[in-house]
């Protein structure tokens, strides 16, 4: 893993709270100003395996004032109609152990064509595209539904990736950038505004042997000149949150090449109309909607011309049938 080791680098303080599922994902966006990084994992599920609550960790490079942080958290949580713990426990991670504590070392998982695993010794199934990954403090281990939806969409777009320019915006652990680089002969840019995510992605890219084709950089959205200099992208992957995706719609449309695809996730099914409408306003056609309730993903495409487009429709039953339609997909099944 990249980052602190052997006593180097900053100590990190971790503060944990448990939040109801109804507060997601808006709560994460609201918590970002209070911490250097925020991570989230399912805490409890109901009988139908639907999430009921999430464990949310705030990571800070300096030990916080518990009383001041408690006041700030109370204000944020009140907006989402729940109360944080009365007494905050601040757990300090030593430099040599904080990445190990935070790392996701779950069992190997298969998502479509991809085999995501934490140990180089894991046997790789025949024909699978292996991704060697420890997420560390960065989001994206292949276990969360939104990551799996993006990987599924990426696998189905593989035929468009030969010699393509690909952007993984909000790369987290770098899992989507690595998947694209391993799936096809393409050039990939991976960007995140979190320096921890950038370091983790750099190490994961190196461990997967794709450093020669994946350029990792820190960027607040599309602001870095290197991203503008790269030209328009044939595929953009953005697994972020609904509100940032709405705000980024104009820039993403400008950054997408004619005929290029945009894969969006990180939002709930009820937020699909708002996200889709924001991007439709900038000329992006809806190709497919994928769901792993309560989470969703969208595949959009920038039109090549005014003459209509060959679209793909993805239903909950796995249909991915081609149709011709000017106003949106119509599922063939």
Image (spheres, helix red, strand yellow):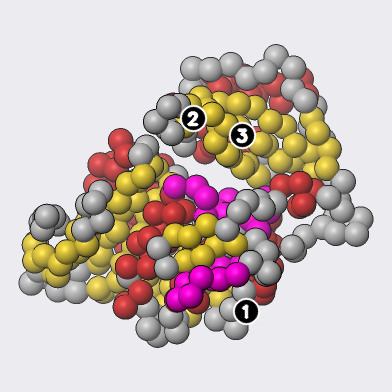
Q: Which residue is mark 2?
A: 45
Q: What secondary structure is found at the residue carrying circle 2?
A: strand
Q: Position of residue 123 (x, y in %)?
A: 60, 70
Label the magenta part by its dominant secondary structure.
loop
Q: What secondary structure is found at the residue carrying circle 3?
A: strand
- Tell me which residue sits at (37%, 83%) in the image: 162
Q: Which residue is mark 3?
A: 56
Nearer to us: label 1 or label 2 = 2
Marks 1 and 2, how far apart at CA: 37 Å
Q: Quadrant of the N terminus?
A: bottom right
Marks 2 and 3, how far apart at CA: 15 Å
- Which label's residue is closer to the chain start, 3 or 1? 3
Q: Which residues are magenta?
A: 123-145
Q: Which residue is mark 1?
A: 209
Question: Relative to the observer, which residue lies in front, 5 or 34?
Answer: 5
Marks 3 and 1, how far apart at CA: 32 Å
- Which label's residue is closer to the chain start, 1 or 2? 2
Q: Is residue 325 left or right of residue 244?
A: left
- Tell me which residue sits at (52%, 38%) in the image: 29
Figure quadrant of residue 234: bottom left
Does 157 lie within the magenta span? no
Structural crowding at the residue carrying mark 3, measured as other residues with C-alpha within 10 Å and reported as few (<14), some (14–19) or many (≥20): many
As drawn, the residue found furthest toward the right would be: 7
- Tell me which residue sits at (8%, 66%) in the image: 324
């Amino acid at each position: 893993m990249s980052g602190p080791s052997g006593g180097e680098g900053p100590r990190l303080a971790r503060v944990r709270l448990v939040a109801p599922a109804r507060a997601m994902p808006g709560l994460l966006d609201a918590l970002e100003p209070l911490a250097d990084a925020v991570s989230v994992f399912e805490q409890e599920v109901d009988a139908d395996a639907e999430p009921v609550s999430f464990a949310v960790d705030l990571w800070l490079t300096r030990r916080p004032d518990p009383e001041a942080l408690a006041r700030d958290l109370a204000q944020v949580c009140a907006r989402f109609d729940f109360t944080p713990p009365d007494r905050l426990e601040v757990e300090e991670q030593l430099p040599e152990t904080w990445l190990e504590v935070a790392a996701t070392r779950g069992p190997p998982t298969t998502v479509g064509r991809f085999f995501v695993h934490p140990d180089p010794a894991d046997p790789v199934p025949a024909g699978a595209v292996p991704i060697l990954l420890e997420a560390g403090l960065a989001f994206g281990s292949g276990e969360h539904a939104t990551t799996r939806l993006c990987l599924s969409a990426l696998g189905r777009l593989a035929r468009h990736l030969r010699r393509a320019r690909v952007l993984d915006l909000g790369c987290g652990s770098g899992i989507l950038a690595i998947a694209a680089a391993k799936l096809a002969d393409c050039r990939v840019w991976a960007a995140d505004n979190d320096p921890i995510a950038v370091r983790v992605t750099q190490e994961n890219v190196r461990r997967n042997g794709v450093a020669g084709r994946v350029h990792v950089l820190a960027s607040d959205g599309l602001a870095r000149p290197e991203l503008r200099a790269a030209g328009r992208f044939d595929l953009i992957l953005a697994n972020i949150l609904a509100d940032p995706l709405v705000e980024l719609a104009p820039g993403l449309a400008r950054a997408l090449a004619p005929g290029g695809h945009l894969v969006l996730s990180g939002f709930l099914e009820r937020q699909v109309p708002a996200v889709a409408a924001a991007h439709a306003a900038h000329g992006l056609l809806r190709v497919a909607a994928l769901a792993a309730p309560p989470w969703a993903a969208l595949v959009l495409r920038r039109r090549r011309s005014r003459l209509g487009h060959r679209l793909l429709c993805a239903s909950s039953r796995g249909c991915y049938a081609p149709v011709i339609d000017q106003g949106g997909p119509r599922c063939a099944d």
